[in-house]
Structure formats: C-alpha cells, structure tokens
Amino acid sequence: MKLYDAPRCPYCARVRIALAEKGIPYETIEVDLRNRPDWIFELNPSGRVPVLDDGFVLPESAVIMEYLDERYSDPPLLPREPAARAEARLLVHRFDELLGDDYYAFRRGEENALAERLESIPAVDSLFVDIAYVPWVIRARDLLGIELPGPLESWLEQLEQRPSVAAEAAVVQGLS
Ligand SMILES: N[C@@H](CCC(=O)N[C@@H](CS)C(=O)NCC(=O)O)C(=O)O
C-alpha cells in the first residue's frame, strides 16, 4: 500500500491515523504542496493529497477512511449499529461547516467563528469521527496557538493516549 502524503496536511493526517490504528504497513510518498509534481494530477485530477494506492487509486480522506475500515475491520473505526454509523458519516460529511470553514478563515485572518466551533465539536462515541476532527484540533493548539476549551482539551488528552494520535501530534511538533 502506498500513501501520497504531506506531513502538514490534516486530511492526510486522517489517513495516517487510520492506518496506524489498523496497524497497516505502507510506503509514504511525500508530495511537496508548494511545488506539486505533475504526476499527482494523473492520480487525482484535483492535484490534492491524500491519495491511497492499494492496487487501485483512491483520493478523498473520508472515503479512504471508510475503505480502510471495510477492508481491515479490526479495530473498527465506525460504530456497529447502522443508525450510529450513519450519524458518524454525517458528522464527517458536515466537517467543513462544523469546523473546517472557520479553521481556514482563521488561518487566512478572515472573520470566523473558530472559537465557537471548537466549543461545539461533535462529541460522539466514534473513533471514525474523532480521527476525522482531531488533526485540526491538534493544529489549532500547536500551530495556531489557540487555547482549547476545557472539554476539548480533555478529549484531546484522552485521544493522545493512543499511539496513532500521539504520533500525529509529534508530526505537528516537527512542523512548528
Ligand atoms: N477533500 C479532500 C481535501 C484534501 C486537501 O485539500 N488537501 C490539501 C492539502 S491539506 C491539498 O492537497 N491542497 C492542494 C490544493 O488544494 O491545491 C480530502 O478530504 O482528502
């Protein structure tokens, strides 16, 4: 398995964490986001990472996470029950409006509601949702210097007990 990856990219981080949770060995091919090679557009017409190659080429972090969860079922990321699975997928589908849009507005120095968004990050019992949101929370704390609200800080501290998430926090430390 190959992952076209960029350490700075939180979408790639979703996939790194999912791969680590599942203990899947893979080869990393680092893509320079400031000088993207032409061949990345052949793999993904948008030129974006992450892209997974598992004998076929798959872009889009949330789709990759679902693929990995189906292909390697242990440990499961999505809950078992269909309703809970649907709810988890919905929260990831709504990531932009629930966090992403305001995170990037903050980063661009535009008006934003990042503080409110961080107060109300969806708290559900789903590793799938946790993995989909945690890369931005780590970066908000460690790259944007934002003091996290108490409950979110506790949530992150708990997640950082997992080697997969601790490894991602170390990647971010290496960026700053
Ligand atoms: N919807 C995509 C977004 C991926 C994405 O935006 N990746 C960024 C890096 S963090 C990228 O490749 N940006 C290059 C560009 O937008 O041209 C996903 O979930 O995988």
Image (spheres, rainbow, N blue to C red):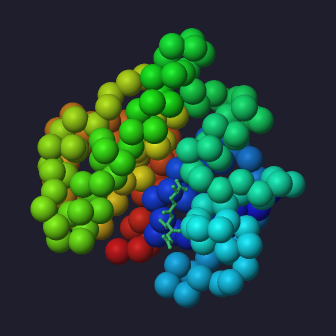
User: Where is residue 145 drawn, in percent x and y?
Assistant: 20, 64
When the figure is inspected, residue 85 is found, relative to residue 104, above or below; the finding is above
When the figure is inspected, residue 127 is found, relative to residue 98, above or below; the finding is above
When the figure is inspected, residue 115 is found, relative to residue 130, above or below; the finding is below
User: Where is residue 123 drawn, in percent x and y?
Assistant: 33, 28
User: Where is residue 114 drawn, in percent x and y?
Assistant: 19, 52
Q: Considering depth in this image, is 26 or 104 the residue closer to the camera?
A: 104
Left or right: where 137 falls relative to 19? left
Residue at the (64%, 37%) spot, across then down: 66
Q: Considering depth in this image, is 83 or 115 the residue closer to the camera?
A: 83
Residue at the (13%, 62%) spot, across then down: 111
Residue ranking furthest to the right: 55
User: Where is residue 44 drawn, in percent x and y?
Assistant: 67, 66
Residue at the (30%, 41%) spot, across then down: 98
User: What is the quadrant of residue 39 in the picture?
Assistant: bottom right
Q: In which quarter of the image is the N terminus?
A: bottom right
When the figure is inspected, residue 160 is found, relative to residue 51, above or below; the finding is above
Q: Considering depth in this image, is 125 or 37 the residue closer to the camera?
A: 37
Left or right: where 84 falls relative to 52? left
User: What is the quadrant of residue 37 in the picture?
Assistant: bottom right
**Total marks drawn?**
0
Asked if one can make out residue 171 in the rendered structure from this viewpoint, the answer is no
Asked if one can make out residue 63 in the rendered structure from this viewpoint, the answer is yes
User: What is the quadrant of residue 22 in the picture?
Assistant: top right
Residue at the (35%, 74%) spot, across then down: 176
Residue ranking furthest to the bottom: 35
